[in-house]
């Protein structure tokens, strides 16, 4: 949660990323960290590679608290095999969860290091690292987990949060566990990663890259509107000019990438609308999208429209919960909202590809400004930053696709977010299922209603700006108790178990 006057320099495709569900911070981010580590390890000096014998991943904070429900372990392991999130097939994550599968970290100048769920250690939920979602990946000179002799106490137990090895002492020598002296060898190379939400990662010691400066700099909505007025450019035209300058890509390539994201989101909804069965995890939650989609046919027009809206959102959110390919918008947990509104725009409102593409650019703008000035991760600001921002993005998308002014786009986003303020992140069992899936449907319909209000009110009579509602969200997020920030330690997550 911060406000920086530095201009926003994110790429559209930093925010709109394709990857496997169910969580951008707990799945896509850790997978990206694993893939980054794999690249660095493969480039280590030959003698270090030759000495390597094992690998340990330590998950801390919310990654430890809800990592199992979110598939964090398989995601890191999948990344360590060298697979990037947008190339990940669900079968890789299934194999990465299987201790018998043959998966390896490839070291060209050394041995291939075996990987699996046994590589993962679930560490303390409370820790002193600068970001809640921290993971530490260590290349060791001995196999991991260590082979125990009969007299050893079980110092390591993946999944048992009560028995942990302490952190390295900073010298590279791993300290002995307090309750058993099990030698896991020396750390040859390690990286401390932070999964900061929306699939973004940072690492300890990361230097700020020298960014190209966008031709139309803005750090908030007020500045963005000023840049539009000065340049005479429309919202999406300005974003494409900035994207071209920041990435060096040609406008036609950027348009093609936006269309690819639209196509992936459409596919996600279609897959979800035809899938049946039970979602992974211990809740035993049955998929509902196909039933809603089928029943919508027999309903009266108004109910039919709402039921289809729900079906589309459920479809994408259920695909996310099942580990399917989704697009973060802005996160995995909230990845059903924008696709649901997009599908509604296409199938029910007849808005063409060009309009939907323009709309998607507006959605990204709203997500950029939220990330820059408040936060988009449940672990940082609660669900207001995920479903709330997704709803704001979708409302802006619809307003812009229908040709309304930037002021109306802003108002639509503001209305949608305003009514999600204070929303906690309390996933039952740590799975991105309850309340997440239903919440995507509610967020999508709120987005539609917010756009409807904004497009039919006098835009200049609107009192609250998007920048102001983001300031409120940041403050609420700061004050929100940690148990309501993706730890599954409070709210619905606890009450449902007690009921
Ligand atoms: S409750 Fe909201 S923020 Fe938390 S995991 Fe679910 S969708 Fe994400």
Image: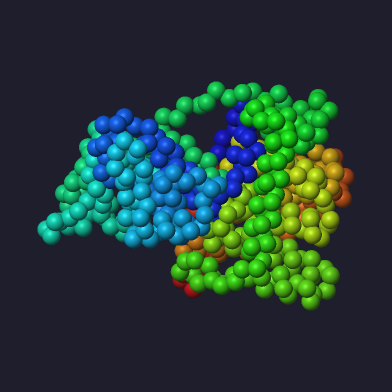
- Given the current orientation, which residue lies at the most extreme bottom position? 298
Q: As drawn, is 170 to the left or to the right of 452?
A: left
Query: Residue at position x 67%, y 41% from top?
Result: 257
User: Residue 464 in the image: x percent, y percent?
Assistant: 75, 42
Can residue 218 be seen from the camera position used here?
Answer: no
* Colouring method of the image: rainbow
Quarter in which the N terminus is drawn? top right
Image side of residue 475 versus residue 164, left or right: right
Residue depicted at 74% across the width and 68% down the height: 307
Residue 269 visible (yes or no)? yes
In this picture, is 265 found above or below 13?
A: below
Residue 350's x, y, as percent? 84, 56
- Above or below, 226 against 55 in this view is above
Residue at x 31% of width, y 59% of height: 160
- Residue situated in front as seen by the camera: 216 or 428: 216
Judge whether 431 appears above or below 358 on screen.
below
């Amino acid at each position: 949660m911060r406000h920086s006057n530095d201009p926003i320099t994110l790429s559209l495709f930093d925010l709109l990323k394709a990857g496997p569900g169910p969580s951008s911070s707990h799945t896509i981010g850790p997978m990206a960290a694993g893939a980054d580590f794999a690249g660095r390890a493969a480039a280590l000096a030959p003698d270090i590679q030759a000495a390597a014998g094992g690998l340990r991943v330590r998950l801390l904070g919310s990654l430890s608290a809800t990592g199992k429900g979110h598939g964090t372990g398989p995601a890191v392991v999948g990344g360590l095999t060298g697979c990037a999130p947008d190339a990940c097939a669900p079968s890789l994550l299934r194999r990465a969860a299987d201790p018998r599968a043959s998966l390896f970290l490839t070291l060209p100048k050394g041995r291939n290091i075996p990987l699996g769920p046994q590589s993962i250690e679930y560490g303390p939920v409370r820790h002193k690292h600068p970001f809640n979602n921290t993971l530490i990946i260590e290349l060791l000179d001995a196999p991991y987990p260590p082979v125990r002799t009969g007299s050893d106490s079980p110092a390591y137990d993946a999944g048992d949060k009560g028995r942990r090895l302490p952190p390295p002492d900073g010298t590279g020598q791993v300290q002995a566990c307090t309750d058993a002296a099990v030698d896991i060898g020396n750390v040859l190379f390690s990286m401390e990663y932070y999964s900061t939400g929306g699939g973004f990662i940072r690492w300890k010691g990361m230097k700020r890259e020298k960014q190209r400066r966008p031709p139309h700099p803005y750090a908030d909505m007020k500045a963005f509107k000023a840049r539009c007025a000065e340049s005479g450019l429309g919202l999406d035209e300005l974003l494409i000019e900035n994207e071209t300058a920041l990435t060096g890509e040609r406008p036609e390539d950027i348009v093609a990438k936006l269309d690819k994201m639209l196509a992936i989101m459409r596919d996600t909804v279609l897959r979800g609308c035809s899938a049946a069965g039970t979602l992974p995890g211990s809740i035993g939650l049955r998929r509902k999208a196909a039933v809603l989609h089928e029943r919508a046919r027999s309903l009266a027009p108004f109910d039919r429209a709402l039921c289809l809206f729900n079906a589309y959102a459920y479809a994408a959110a259920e695909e996310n919960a099942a580990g399917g390919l989704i697009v973060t918008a802005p996160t995995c947990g909230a990845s059903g909202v924008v696709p649901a509104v997009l599908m509604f725009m296409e199938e029910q409102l007849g808005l063409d590809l060009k309009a939907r593409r323009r709309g998607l650019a507006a959605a990204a703008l709203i997500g950029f400004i939220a990330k820059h000035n408040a936060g988009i991760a449940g672990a940082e600001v609660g669900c207001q930053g995920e479903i709330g921002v997704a709803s704001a993005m979708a409302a802006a998308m619809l307003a812009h696709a229908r040709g309304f002014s930037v002021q109306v786009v802003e108002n639509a986003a503001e209305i949608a977010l305003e009514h999600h303020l204070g929303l906690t992140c309390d996933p039952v069992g740590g799975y991105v299922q309850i309340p997440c899936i239903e919440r995507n449907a509610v967020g999508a319909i709120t987005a539609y209603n917010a756009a409807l209000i904004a497009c039919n009110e006098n835009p200049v009579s609107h009192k609250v700006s998007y920048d102001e509602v983001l300031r409120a969200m940041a403050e609420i997020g700061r004050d929100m108790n940690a148990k309501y920030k993706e730890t599954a330690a409070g709210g619905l997550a606890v009450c449902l178990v007690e009921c």
